[in-house]
Image: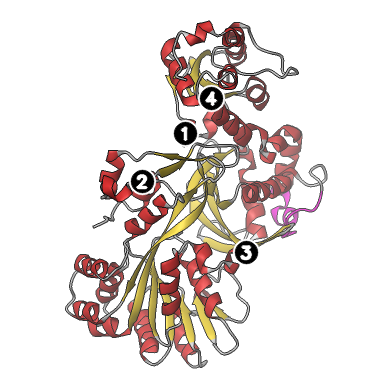
């Protein structure tokens, strides 16, 4: 049944809810949009489009809306939860808010009186408004903690820190005390970690600014602001983090690295910590490492079934070099660990040299690079060769010396895994040659190059199918014939996910070396020609692999276009 503008006034229930003032919070009130849906007037999108056009309201898609800390602070949590509103924009005089019931005049009047600003309703799906309220106002233990800790306690904490920072934070464990017993900053840092784990964050960023401190979580590869502490907490928080991670508390002039062992029930987590001096204080970035990810199989990493077969054949080769390429944070190390776990057995000696060792693997000898004693990749690799290994994993081929030793090891009967930072698989060959490795050595030692990127996965709870659009097909390099009888998918956004996405998967480009490619490498032909030859022989480019995952409903067109902007499907 199509929804028409006149239905807004014809329907008795809609009129009653839309004009009847705010329903007290102790009554089970239905919003206008809920009434429309329950009475079968329209689906949510149709109803909201008509509502916006009829009343001249702005229509906003909150699924991809970027939330900032200053926006969240425009409305107090109790008001956001009571009136079911979320701020979306503001200036000196006006506050634009997305409401579950945009026709409720009492809500806008109350908010105007509370905030001292003119309130402009914005039309958005009720489930999206509720999701943002839950994410930024209801579920934050950190936000709740702020309201529990008095300013006097904060002042006392800062005074204690100034008296003896090292004594204050000498216990390098997450606090086991209750919030009332533990010092406020200790409680805050505990909540920072626990909330990050709850939100599935991979990184925590603590960034000092001129007038405050910015706290951000990286969730599924995208940074999100979270409620931040007062500026006066800055030094105390950073001191606590530095002591937990084993850093020198007195050293604030140079970058430092450390590690924290998180004791969270049911989770075995390590945190890799990096500090960087900035003009407003030390910036701290923490990478959360989950030991459970080491137990992933190749299918869990994101390989398609035929790619798993291809990759397993490669990693069981008796010798040669296998390279993983991609930018920082693209999951190269996780995939290499999955590969090593697959071939790890009592008959195979595996040795790794890493900077740093991110995960501890049973049955594998792992070496940590140590710059303080001049133990670099090249020196460690030379020593490893005297340990009679079958398989070697080098964290990164950073320089000519490391690359030459690794290639030499491959040519003398070892299987060598390593990584490079290149945009695609063929570019790894030209990168090694540019570093100074002789082309014939690259051609003869290289078994394969695997390029990898991480893309956000569509949330299964709110995934919906839709007909493909011509502009999407054109951008991807495909035609309507390629998708005949098939659908694309997207997440509408729900309480479980972050804007329609939940978790990530990988897309891959596997280039296996063969006689033709070896001759092209020796002739030093450009990466573009190597790529065309590899695709002709059956290689899927990153975008092609992404296309398969679009059709499987694992990710979206927008995500593949974003991640493979430099790639093409031809």
Q: Does residue 369 appear in this view?
A: no
Q: Residues within 10 Å of mark 3 (few under 14, many from 20)?
A: few
- Of 217 and 480, the residue lying toward us: 480
Q: Say few, some or many: other residues with alpha carbon within 10 Å of mark 1 (under 14 / 14 to 19 / 20 or more).
A: few
Label pair 4/2, CB-CB below 8 angstroms:
no
Residue 176 drawn at (x, y percent):
79, 53
Image quadrant assignment for residue 59: top left
Instruction: Judge depth for marks 2 and 1 and give the one in front.
Output: 2
Q: Are marks 1 and 3 in contact (CB under 8 Å)?
A: no
Main SS class of the magenta portion in the image: loop
Q: Earlier in the sequence, mark 4 or mark 3?
A: 4
Residue highlighted by disc 2: 485
Q: Are marks 2 and 1 in contact (CB under 8 Å)?
A: no
Upstream in the sequence, badge 4 or badge 2? 4
On the image, numbered disc 4 is attached to which residue?
Answer: 87
User: Residue at (36%, 48%) from the top-left corner?
Assistant: 562
Q: Position of residue 412 (x, y in %)?
A: 38, 92
**Nearest to the observer: residue 289 or residue 232:** 289
User: Which residue is label 1 attached to?
Assistant: 65
For marks 2 and 1, the one nearer the N-term is 1
Query: Distance from label 4 to label 1 (Cα)?
Result: 11 Å
Region rendered in magenta: 162-177
In the structure shown, which secondary structural element does the residue marked by tag 1 occupy? Answer: loop
Give neighbour class at mark 2: few <14, some 14-19, many 20+ (Cα, 10 Å): few
Q: Residue at x 54, y 62 (%)?
A: 256
Q: Does the magenta segment cover residue 174?
A: yes
In the rendered structure, find residue 202 and report the number of the disc placed on it: none
Q: Which residue is mark 3?
A: 292
Left or right position of 539 against 3: left
Query: Which is more N-terminal, label 2 or label 3?
Result: 3
Q: Residue at x 25, y 44 (%)?
A: 474
């Amino acid at each position: 049944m199509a929804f028409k503008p006149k239905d807004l006034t014809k329907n008795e229930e809609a009129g009653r809810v839309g004009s009847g003032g705010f329903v007290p919070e102790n009554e089970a009130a239905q919003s206008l949009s809920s009434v429309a849906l329950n009475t079968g007037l329209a689906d949510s999108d149709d109803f909201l489009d008509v509502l916006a056009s009829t009343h001249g309201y702005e229509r906003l898609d909150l699924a991809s809306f970027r939330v900032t800390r200053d926006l969240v602070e425009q409305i107090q949590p109790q008001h956001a939860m009571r009136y079911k509103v979320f701020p979306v924009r503001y200036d000196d005089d006006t506050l634009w808010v997305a409401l579950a019931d945009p026709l409720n005049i009492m809500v806008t009047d109350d908010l105007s009186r509370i905030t001292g600003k003119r309130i402009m309703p914005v039309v958005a799906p009720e489930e999206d408004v509720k999701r943002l309220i839950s994410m930024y106002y209801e579920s934050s233990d950190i936000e709740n903690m702020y309201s529990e800790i008095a300013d006097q306690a904060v002042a006392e904490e800062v005074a204690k820190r100034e008296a003896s920072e090292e004594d204050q934070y000498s216990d390098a464990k997450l606090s086991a005390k209750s919030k009332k017993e533990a010092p406020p900053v200790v409680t805050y840092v505990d909540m920072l970690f626990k909330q990050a784990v709850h939100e599935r964050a991979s990184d925590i960023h603590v960034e000092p600014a001129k007038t405050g401190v910015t706290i951000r979580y990286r969730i599924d590869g995208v940074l999100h602001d979270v409620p931040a502490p007062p500026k006066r907490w800055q030094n105390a928080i950073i001191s606590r983090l530095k002591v937990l991670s084993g850093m020198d508390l007195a050293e604030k002039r140079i970058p430092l690295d450390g590690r924290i062992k998180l004791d969270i029930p049911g989770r075995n987590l390590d945190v890799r910590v990096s500090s960087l001096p900035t003009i407003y204080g030390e910036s701290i970035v923490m990478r959360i490492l989950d030991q459970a990810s080491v137990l992933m199989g190749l299918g869990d990493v994101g390989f398609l079934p035929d790619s798993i077969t291809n990759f397993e054949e490669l990693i069981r080769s008796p010798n040669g070099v296998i390279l993983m390429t991609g930018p920082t944070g693209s999951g190269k190390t996780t995939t290499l660990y999955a590969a090593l776990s697959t071939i790890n057995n009592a008959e195979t000696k595996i040795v790794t040299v890493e900077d740093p060792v991110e995960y501890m693997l049973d049955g594998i000898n792992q070496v940590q690079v140590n710059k303080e004693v001049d133990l670099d990749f090249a020196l460690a690799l030379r020593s490893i060769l005297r340990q009679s290994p079958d398989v070697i994993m080098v964290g990164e081929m950073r320089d000519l010396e490391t690359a030459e030793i690794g290639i030499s090891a491959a040519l003398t009967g070892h299987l060598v895994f390593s990584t490079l930072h290149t945009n695609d698989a063929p570019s790894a060959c030209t990168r090694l040659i540019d570093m100074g490795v002789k082309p014939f050595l690259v051609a003869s030692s290289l078994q394969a190059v695997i390029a990898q990127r991480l893309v956000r996965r569509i949330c299964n709870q709110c995934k919906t199918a839709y007909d493909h659009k011509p502009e999407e097909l054109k951008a991807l390099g495909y035609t309507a014939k390629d998708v005949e009888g098939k659908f694309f998918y997207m997440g509408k956004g729900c309480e479980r996910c972050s804007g329609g996405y939940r978790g990530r998967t990988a897309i891959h480009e596997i280039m296996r070396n063969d006689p033709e490619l070896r001759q092209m490498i020796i002739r030093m032909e450009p990466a573009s020609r190597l790529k065309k030859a590899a695709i002709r022989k059956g290689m899927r480019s990153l975008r092609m692999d992404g296309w398969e995952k679009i059709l499987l409903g694992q990710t979206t067109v927008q995500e593949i276009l974003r991640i493979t902007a430099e790639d093409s499907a031809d």
